């Protein structure tokens, strides 16, 4: 990802907040989501439901899914990451699953940034018949957790 001005010239931003949301996996755990980004300061919710691991020798941080996400838990408003109720067939009318969207998100804070390289990985253990969705935004309600 590169930041450019209106004339398509490189632009260095003094501070950038990139939020990865909906970091989850398939119900059977065969398909997981992994995001690798340059190491920086980051914010996650208390009792986060994602794995956050610095990758030694690479200056990267890895965000990995730990829990199932039924799809209907995908955030629609990053400024209001909240607990949502839904069921496994994506019908919010019959709730049986509660997901705290903030606990499945991480906000990374970068300073003096003009470009960022990152890797997205969707694992497949065996045969997989669907895909995964990666969602990113700028600031989010996780900003309230910044020191």
Image (spheres, rainbow, N blue to C red):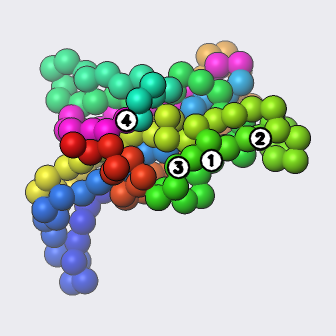
| Contact flag, marks 1 and 2 (Cβ < 8 Å) | no
In front of the other: 77 or 130:
77
The image shows residue 7, relative to residue 13, as above or below, that is: below
The image shows residue 83, relative to residue 77, as above or below, that is: above
Residue 82: x %, y % from top left: 57, 47
Q: Secondary structure at mark 2?
A: strand
Q: Secondary structure at mark 1?
A: loop
Mark linked to residue 44: 4
Q: What whole-number distance in Å separates the C-alpha atoms at marks 3 and 1?
A: 10 Å
Q: Secondary structure at mark 3?
A: loop
Residue 89 lies in quadrant: top right
Q: Is residue 122 visible?
A: no
Horizontally, residue 85 falls left or right of residue 122, namely: right
The residue identified by callout 2 is 86
Q: Residues within 10 Å of mark 1 (few under 14, many from 20)?
A: some
* Residue at 27% from the left image edge and 38% from the top image edge: 42
Horizontally, residue 92 falls left or right of residue 110, namely: right
Give the mark nearer the N terminus: 4 vs 3: 4
Residue 111: x %, y % from top left: 14, 53
The residue identified by callout 1 is 74
* Residue at 19% from the left image edge and 49% from the top image edge: 110
* Quadrant of the snapshot with the N terminus: bottom left
The residue identified by callout 3 is 81
Give the mark nearer the N terminus: 1 vs 2: 1
């Amino acid at each position: 990802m590169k930041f450019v001005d209106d004339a398509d010239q490189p632009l260095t931003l003094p501070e950038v907040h990139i939020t990865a949301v909906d970091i989850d996996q398939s119900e059977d755990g065969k398909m997981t989501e992994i995001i690798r980004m340059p190491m920086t300061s980051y914010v996650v919710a208390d009792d986060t439901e994602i794995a956050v691991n610095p990758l030694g020798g690479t200056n990267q941080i890895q965000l990995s899914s730990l829990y199932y996400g039924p799809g209907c838990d995908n955030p629609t408003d990053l400024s209001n990451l909240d607990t949502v109720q839904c069921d496994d067939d994506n019908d919010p009318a019959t709730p049986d699953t509660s997901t705290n969207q903030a606990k499945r998100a991480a906000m990374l804070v970068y300073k003096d940034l003009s470009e960022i390289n990152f890797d997205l990985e969707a694992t497949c253990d065996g045969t997989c018949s669907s895909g995964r969705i990666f969602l990113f935004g700028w600031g989010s309600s996780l900003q309230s957790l910044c020191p």
